[in-house]
Image (tube, rainbow, N blue to C red):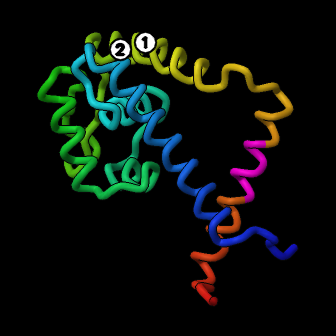
């Protein structure tokens, strides 16, 4: 299906998506600021709490960030007492990561704070509108993934 949208309409929609993402990010930051943990640290801490981590590379791929950024974040989380790392007995090149009680407390509190922001964001939106929006976002993502993988940047 060929697009019938003008370039100006498309740019306006992208700006709205980007602005919404920035607003959400800002609200999350303000809401968890008192916990003393940055949003990215929280995301990785949450990931660690829900997944068995094979490597820093796996975390980097999950969040589409560099392995250096993951290493820095893990170092900060360890330094601030949210996680503990110990060399794996089977392979000393790997680290086992355990979340401390302090880390677990932050995760639980953060989940509640994230839920507040997320619920407020969708206030006044029907289930049908929400589902349609999610379907449209998935179409955007699939189209962009196809464009990127085919390197099909024609005019």
Looking at the image, residue 23 lies above or below residue 149: above
Q: Nearer the viewer, mark 1 or mark 2?
A: 1
Q: CA distance from mark 1 to mark 2?
A: 6 Å
Q: Is residue 95 magenta?
A: no
Q: Badges 1 and 2: C-beta atoms under 8 Å apart?
A: yes
The image quadrant of residue 27 is top left
Side of 141 relative to 18 (left or right): right
Disc 2 target residue: 104
Q: Main secondary structure of the magenta part?
A: helix
Q: Residue furthest left?
A: 79
Front one among 100 and 68:
68
Q: Residues within 10 Å of mark 1 (few under 14, many from 20)?
A: few
The residue under the point 32% across, 50% down is 56
Q: Residues within 10 Å of mark 2 (few under 14, many from 20)?
A: some
Where's residue 7, x and y in %? Answer: 65, 72
Kind of element beneath mark 2:
helix
Where's residue 13, x and y in %? Answer: 63, 55
The image quadrant of residue 41 is top left
Disc 1 target residue: 108
Where's residue 90, x and y in %? Answer: 28, 44
Q: Is residue 134 magenta?
A: yes
* Quadrant of the rendering where the N terminus is positioned: bottom right
């Amino acid at each position: 299906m060929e697009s019938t949208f003008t370039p100006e309409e498309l740019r306006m929609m992208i700006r709205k998506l980007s602005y919404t993402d920035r607003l959400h990010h800002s609200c999350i930051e303000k809401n968890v600021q008192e916990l003393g943990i940055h949003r990215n640290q929280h995301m990785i801490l949450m990931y660690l709490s829900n997944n068995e981590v094979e490597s820093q590379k796996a975390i980097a791929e999950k969040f589409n960030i560099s392995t250096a950024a993951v290493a820095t974040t893990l170092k900060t989380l360890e330094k601030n007492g949210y996680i503990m790392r110990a060399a794996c007995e089977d392979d000393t090149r790997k680290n086992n990561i355990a979340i401390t009680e302090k880390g677990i407390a932050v995760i639980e509190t953060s989940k509640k704070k994230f839920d507040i922001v997320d619920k407020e964001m969708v206030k006044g939106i029907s289930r049908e509108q929400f589902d349609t929006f999610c379907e449209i976002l998935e179409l955007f993502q699939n189209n962009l993934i196809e464009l990127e993988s085919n390197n099909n940047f024609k005019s």
